[in-house]
Image (cartoon, rainbow, N blue to C red):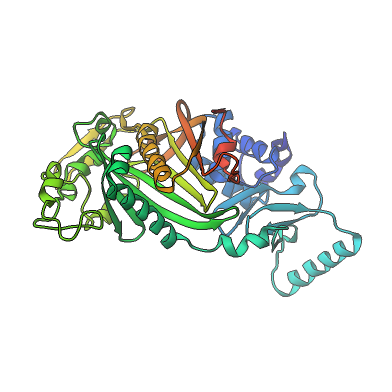
Amino acid sequence: MVATAVEGKLKDHGYRATTGRKTILDVLANTKENLSAEDIYLKVHSIYPSIGLASVYRTLEILVNAGIVHKFNFRDRIARYKLIEGTKGKGHHHHLICTVCHKIIDCADFVDEELALLKQTEKHLSKNITSKLLIIWSSITGYVRNASKRRNNSLIDKTEETAGFINHCWLTILSESLLKEQSGLKYVSHMNDGNPYWYLWFTDCAGVYKCELLEARAVEGYDWLAEFAVKYYPRDTEAVYNGLSILEKACRAGNLFHTRPPDGPHGCQCHSLPDEHEAERFSELSHDTGAPSYQFNSTIPADFFYAGNMSVAFKKDIGSLIRVKSQTTWRVIFTEDYAIPSDNGTSSIMVKKGEVDRDYPGFVITRFFYNKFVRCWALFNKYTTQDEHTWKGEGILFKSDGQNLWPELSPDIQKIIAQTELRFRSENILPLLADEDMACMDSKIH
């Protein structure tokens, strides 16, 4: 075990070699990857289940301060950690970091002249600039071969173009009676008060979906790749409503959702201008639309009503690759008794230790919207070929003490990725899209 070799170093800095610290060191010693704290936590948790994410963060900082583990950051702003080579008996090396794909290559193939130059540089910098220099951890940035060709395209923002495509799709479906009937799409409202998003009503669904465009960019092999967050605002008559947290239910029942269609004759791009039959078209929404008012949209916490994520990769004249990611449930369990204050602050709701505060069936909700989107997208683009795949893996349970939230792997919850390939012709080939989550999945079901 590598941990044995560094116990003395830990003691020199006043720290004990606890089981948790040894386990973290062993995980780092047995990987060639540069891991984030969350990556390390998930690996350690399967070996040492009693450890928490906060403990992993604290231990990593201890190991960094003791000179056992190196911490470095990339442009994605996520700190990653790696065992310093001397601990594993390796020699002097540098990191070559691609500024496009962030690939990290260990480089230790130095000739004597290069090592002499590095030592001379280290001596000069230590004398004239800094009293302590760990040049063994210098990071040389550049482009991995072929990555530089993708650099300009990968940085192009495609949000406006993508929003236009998606909006045109919804409006086309709504404006043609046959397509509207085939898709089950009833109404759509396009909003943009930060990120572009859409509220969508379907004939076979009581609540309202929100599809928010988080990011759209050019990627290799596709014109654009768009990432969406999918949320669902259920009616209190639906079974899934019971899976919302106490605060989500209070939010859903509050004034934020008491929105109605505007009075008088109004129209839209699908129903002439003006439309004297507005009240008739929206008769079932006369009480409320089921969607929050745009005035209060930004005040709703980002994780409220969240169900899953969807991505769409589009290639003109070839096809589209659509993926959805979620869990069988998004479950939160309290680890301590916690009093949730009411709006006026005078009374509260007590949640007991061990109680489930949220048990939202994410994949069922997200899959419904995903199927609707795939249907609409296929009708809009007139795709003729469709292939589907599903991946499943172990999901995550969330625990809360009322102030903090941390994840734990759970065999009772499944993480699921579903994918649909839509093509104009069966012989068309869609490029693969790398996905770290898929690499961790246990099975692939056609």
* Residue nearest the viewer, comparing 445 with 384: 384
**Residue 315 seen anywhere in this rendered image of the structure:** yes
Decide if residue 147 is on the left or right side of residue 438: right
Q: x, y percentage for residue 313?
A: 50, 49
Point out the residue furthest to the bottom here: 128
Residue 130 lies, with reference to residue 184, above or below; the image says below
Q: How many marks?
A: 0
Which quadrant would the C terminus be assigned to in this image? Answer: top right
Residue 276 lies, with reference to residue 31, above or below; the image says below
On the image, which quarter does residue 191 sit in? bottom left
Residue in the picture at 21% in, 36% down: 235
* Residue nearest the viewer, comparing 15 with 52: 52
* Residue nearest the viewer, comparing 301 with 325: 325
Q: x, y percentage for residue 233?
A: 26, 41
Point out the residue furthest to the right here: 112
Decide if residue 400 is on the left or right side of residue 291: right
Decide if residue 170 is on the left or right side of residue 75: left
Residue in the picture at 55% in, 42% down: 425
Q: x, y percentage for residue 268?
A: 22, 57
Which quadrant would the N terminus be assigned to in this image? Answer: top right
Decide if residue 122 is on the left or right side of residue 45: right
**Residue 99 seen anywhere in this rendered image of the structure:** no
Q: x, y percentage for residue 8?
A: 71, 42
Point out the residue furthest to the left here: 264
